[in-house]
Amino acid sequence: MKRQLHLTVGMRLLDVGCGRGSFLNSLHREMPSLRLFGLERDVRRALDAMRLTEASVLVGDGQVLPFRSGTFDRVVLGYALHHMSPSVRGRVLAEIARVLQTGGRLLVIEKAAPRGWLERLGLSIQVLSGGEDRQVYSLFGEGLTGELEAAGLSVLSDQEVKRRRVASAVPESHTRNR
Ligand SMILES: C[S@@+](CC[C@H](N)C(=O)[O-])C[C@H]1O[C@@H](n2cnc3c(N)ncnc32)[C@H](O)[C@@H]1O
């Protein structure tokens, strides 16, 4: 995943829904020059992240990012989108497009849709037993690109790495200017 971020010295990176900060922590270990920020709405997880990482971690909701437009070179959404309703996702993605600078890049890492009848059957059982959300799988099976574009982001690549779906996107204003 880190390879896909194309990181260079001193970049400013925001992890939205950073959880307990494990991704930020591993980024810092590999590249201490990065200026790292995390945003997490769950106070306990945010406190854990503050203890674990050197990053500046804030408690907040990704729908209203407390940063000026064009602040970041990179934004990461790691397994966070599927916690959000469609309307929340739209607002979070639009905020990310705003805080990315020209040439900035968003990396989305998410679950992939089930493949084949056996996986679909397994998912149906999980959905019926209340353990999973069908909508999540249809979103990441088909709709992720559309949601990114609706938020003003142009998709650079959309691929599956093992059972994860990885999309990389830039603000549309940037692709228009190229
Ligand atoms: C599955 S965890 C992933 C944590 C981390 N990104 C990782 O990959 O290990 C998803 C996190 O997103 C956070 N989250 C969900 N919706 C959010 C929102 N609207 N604003 C900020 N954080 C949010 C949740 O509280 C949770 O900690």
Image (cartoon, rainbow, N blue to C red):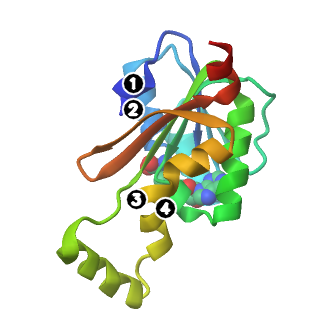
**Total marks in image:** 4
CA distance separating discs 1 and 4: 33 Å
Say which element carries label 4.
helix
Residue at the spot of label 1: 29
Q: Residue at x 29, y 66 (%)?
A: 114
Residue at the spot of label 2: 26
Is residue 121 placed above or below 84 in the rendered structure? below
Say which element carries label 2.
helix
Q: Nearer the viewer, mark 1 or mark 4?
A: 4
Is residue 22 placed above or below 120 in the rendered structure? above
Q: Nearer the viewer, mark 4 or mark 2?
A: 4
CA distance separating discs 2 and 1: 5 Å
CA distance separating discs 1 and 3: 33 Å
* Marking on residue 141: 3
Q: Nearer the viewer, residue 43 or 41?
A: 41
Residue 41 seen in the figure: no
Mark 3 and mark 4 residues within 8 Å of each other at the beta carbon: yes
Pinpoint residue 107: horizontal percent, then vertical percent: 49, 36
